Every structure is written in structure tokens, then in C-alpha cells.
Image (cartoon, rainbow, N blue to C red):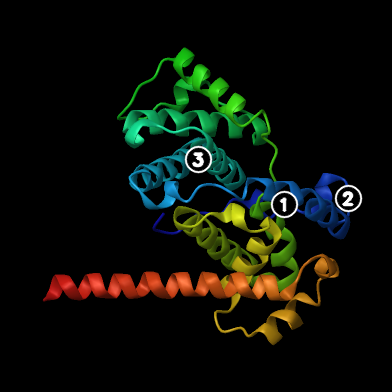
Amino acid sequence: MEGKIRIEERSLAPLQEYGASEDEYVSILIEREKGTLAFKNIESFIFVNCFSHSRINALNWILQTRATLGFSFQTAYLSMAYFDRFLSKCSIDNGKCWKMRLLSIACLTLAAKMEESEVPVLTEFQSEDYCFENKVIQRMELLVLSTLEWNMVMITPLVFLPYFITKLCNESQTCHVLSKTIQIIFTLIQEVNLMDHRPSVIAAAATLVAMDQHLTIESVKLKMSSIHEFRFLVAEDIFAYYDQIQSFYIEKENYKTQEKESYTQ
């Protein structure tokens, strides 16, 4: 997930396009996101054992293919969520690479059908290292659908970003903060189970980290109090996750420093 993420203009599409005012639309999202927490008990094994490396490779493939096919980041996030939910319910023998790739293809095609106005034919989703027949991909799609009980609609942190960023940032900063916030979210999804937190809390915390890495609980409360829908959010929850993101990045930087020092010795 290293490197800069290019942001398309549609990433900051006005929320009014959805037929409601910004505040009304976010109220609807916050009400609907409660269902997302039903997926929070994703087993930790997919993050810590032999699946971890295969999972990261699969998520990287999803991001790369998203860019190649011109899909939105919402599509990429949704496919990653399907991927993790599937693995929490159905095991893959020793994280076999070809099976993990087939699963990632099926999850991305399903997410594209949910989010994109135009979906390429299945042959467009093939990778250089594996080639699957269309009927094989379709069978895996059906297995994913049945395993997830056809519950494919999810609220993600990305749908909240236009609201929080336009409310919290100066207009001149929006593209920079959006790029950094999306980078933070897709870095986190590699390492932690984002299903443990409300999407609105993840979006708010990641946006605040992208804006300023030295906030206190008081300054978070002050910033969030300017937002109309803040009454639905708890400042302590946002700050707790803000602090968790900060700790994660500090730990990651310390690891990189130690690794670099070990090479120079």
C-alpha cells in the first residue's frame, strides 16, 4: 500500500447529488451504519497467522486492479470487506495463493457490480500470474454471495469523507487531506479489523489525523462541535481511535527505524 494514492474528482462528489442535504444524508448514513457493526467479530486469525501474508498480497492486487480498471476507492474498500468477511466464515487451505487470488477477483467483481456504473467483462479481471475461466470466477462469486448470506450492502468510512473533509478543512486543503485520509484508511485495513469500529468514527478520526497529528481530546471536541451531525457521534470514541491510529504509525515508524539500523550494522 506504499506510495501516493491518486484521487479522482468523484471522490469529493457533493452529497446533494444523492437527493438530500448534506446533514440529512449523513444522518441516514449514521443510522444505517449500525448494521455494519454486525460484522465486527471477524476472527483475528486472518491478521496474524499464515493468512496474513496472502491477505496482504490479495489486498494489494485489489488496489492495483482498482487503479487499472478505473474503479472508485469505495469499490476497493467494499471488496476488501467482502474478502475479510468471507475468510471469517469459510477457511482456505493454508491460504493457498491461487485460491486467495480467485477469492479476491470474485470479491472485486461483486463490489464493482454494487458500485460501478460500468463493469468490465470477467476477462478484464485476470492477473498475470493466474488465469481463471469465467465459469470458475462465477462459481466463486456465488460461493461468496451464499457465504455472506447475500448481505452485500455496507456503509464504509469512505462515504463520510466528503462531509467531514468539507466541514473540517479549508477549501485549499481538501484534495491533500482527502488523499492522505484515504492513504491512512487503506494502510490500516492491512493491519487491523476496521469492522470493530463505526465507519463514521473511522472516517472522522482518519480525517483528523490527516489534518493534524497533535490534537488533544479538547481540540477534537472543539473541531467536531462545529459539525451539525456531531450529536450522533461521541468525541471520546473519535479521539480514542485517533490515538490508536497515531500509535499504529509510531509503532510502524519505530519498526522501520529498527529494520534500517539492523541493515547498517
Asked whether the viewer can see residue 169, the reply is no
* Label 1 environment density (alpha carbons within 10 Å; few <14, some 14–19, many ≥20): few
Tell me: 155 left or right of 140.
right
Residue at (51%, 42%) from the top-left corner? 84
Q: Rounded to the nearest whole Å, what is the CA distance between mark 3 and mark 1?
A: 19 Å
Q: Above or below — where is 133 with respect to 228?
A: above
Q: Residue at x 50, y 22 (%)?
A: 140
Residue nearer the viewer, 55 or 92: 92
Look at 30% across and 30% down and name the residue there.
129
Q: Nearer the viewer, mark 2 or mark 1?
A: 2
From what the image shows, is residue 174 above or below residue 217?
Answer: above
Horizontal and vertical percent position of residue 96: 33, 32
Q: Mark 2: which amino acid?
A: Ala
Q: What's the mark number on residue 107?
A: none
Residue located at (60% from left, 52% from top): 195
**The quadrant where residue 227 appears:** bottom right
Q: Nearer the viewer, mark 3 or mark 1?
A: 3
